[in-house]
């Protein structure tokens, strides 16, 4: 591990000032950052501890729920208002990591975790454009079974790991960021960036900015939502494919509104706008759910070992929607 300076701040203003130093990183639970520092992948010169900031509240506010960035994953998952009004968020958190990690990790840190593949940690033998921009992407022609089929580029096909971020993107979450220039708000679905030619740039964060809170807006589709995760084993494993879905079905059985986001198959939490559009105005059925999945997967591209994810992604969405709709003919 490289040497670094450490400071603990108690106010957001102090944290922002400290975080604006060159090569500074904020730390809360540290479940991703410390791991990568030990692996010599991350080398911050300054580590700013923000655990003593007053950013852990979960508050019922006008129009929705506001969750502080330092709220722990386990606390958010267990909160009755989250479970009642945003069940997909609670389910996604409970399907993430292990109980020990969920007790330690903050939701802000979860949203900031690095998008990565096994080659990201291979410092000597394999190139990685995230770790060393311009060096190449070993996953494209290598072991890519777990990697993305949506949102990829010739520079990176790494799979985004967060379950929570997928549910938040599906349910129209909005992040409040604070930096040297003040506060601004960013839609959760836009916060994570596509790799393009710059895969080392993963988040819509300006210099020195800090996530301070997440707002989840109330909606009928949010209250009727769920999260399905398909993985190799049922404990402590990243998704092969996942889907956060929300439906507003009126008294006549017609889908009036829908929200869908994929995880496990894309380079960022993948908001499925094409699939959502197919569902609007339709009655739930196996055919319409499959049509929605086909519409979203038209742009998918496999790289050999991960070709199976194209069909798996479709089936994951159909199953998630079928379960949520209470079965479909």
Image (spheres, rainbow, N blue to C red):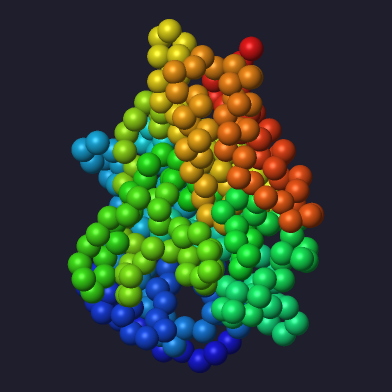
Judged left or right of residue 140, residue 172 is left
Q: State which quarter of the image contains the C terminus.
A: top right
Give left or right: position of 268 versus 212. right
- Residue at image position (37%, 78%) is 48
Q: Is residue 304 visible?
A: yes
Q: Residue furthest bottom?
A: 3
Residue 279's place in the image compared with 307, above or below, is above
Q: Is residue 43 above or below residue 130?
A: below
Where's residue 174, x and y in %?
33, 49
**Which residue is at a point 44% across and 18% down the rendered structure image?**
281
x 23%, y 41%: residue: 61
Q: Is residue 90 above or below residue 36?
A: above
Q: Residue furthest top?
A: 252
Examine the rendered structure and indicate whether residue 324 appears above or below residue 70: above
On the rendered structure, is 254 left or right of 297?
A: left
Residue 232 is at least partly visible in this image: no
Q: Give whichever of 329, 46 is nearer the camera.
A: 329
| Tally of numbered tags | 0
Residue 133, image x and y in percent?
56, 78
Q: Which of the 4 image quarters holds residue 209?
A: bottom left
**Residue at x 58% of width, y 87% of height:** 1
Query: What percent of the width, then of the height, locates residue 130?
Result: 57, 73
* Residue 238 image offset from top left, x and y in percent: 65, 53
């Amino acid at each position: 591990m490289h040497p670094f300076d450490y400071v603990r701040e108690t106010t957001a203003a102090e944290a922002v000032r400290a975080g604006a130093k060159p090569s500074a990183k904020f730390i809360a639970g540290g479940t991703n950052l410390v791991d990568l520092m030990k692996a010599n992948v991350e080398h911050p010169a300054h580590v700013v501890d923000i655990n003593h900031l007053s950013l852990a509240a979960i508050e019922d506010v006008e129009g929705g729920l506001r969750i502080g960035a330092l709220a722990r994953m386990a606390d958010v998952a267990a909160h009755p208002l989250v479970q009642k009004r945003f069940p997909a968020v609670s389910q996604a958190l409970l399907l993430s990591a292990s109980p020990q990690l969920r007790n330690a990790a903050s939701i802000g840190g979860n949203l900031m975790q690095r998008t990565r593949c096994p080659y990201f940690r291979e410092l000597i033998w394999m190139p990685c454009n995230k770790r060393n921009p311009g060096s190449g992407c070993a996953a494209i022609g290598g072991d890519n079974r777990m990697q993305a089929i949506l949102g990829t580029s010739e520079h990176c096909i790494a799979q985004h790991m967060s379950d929570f971020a997928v549910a938040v993107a599906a349910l129209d979450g909005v992040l409040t960021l604070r930096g040297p220039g003040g506060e601004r708000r960013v839609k959760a679905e836009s916060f994570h960036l596509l790799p393009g030619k710059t895969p080392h740039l993963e988040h819509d964060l300006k210099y020195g900015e800090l996530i301070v809170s997440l707002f989840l807006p109330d909606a009928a589709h949010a209250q009727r939502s769920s999260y399905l995760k398909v993985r190799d084993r049922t404990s402590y494993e990243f998704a092969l494919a996942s889907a956060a879905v929300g439906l507003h079905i009126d008294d006549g059985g017609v889908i009036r509104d829908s929200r869908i986001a994929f995880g496990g198959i894309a380079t960022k939490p993948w908001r499925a706008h094409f699939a959502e559009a197919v569902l609007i105005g339709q009655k739930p059925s196996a055919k319409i759910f499959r049509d929605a999945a086909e519409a979203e997967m038209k742009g998918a591209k496999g790289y050999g070992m991960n070709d199976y994810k194209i069909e798996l992604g479709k089936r994951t969405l159909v199953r998630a929607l079928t379960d949520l709709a209470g079965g479909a003919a």
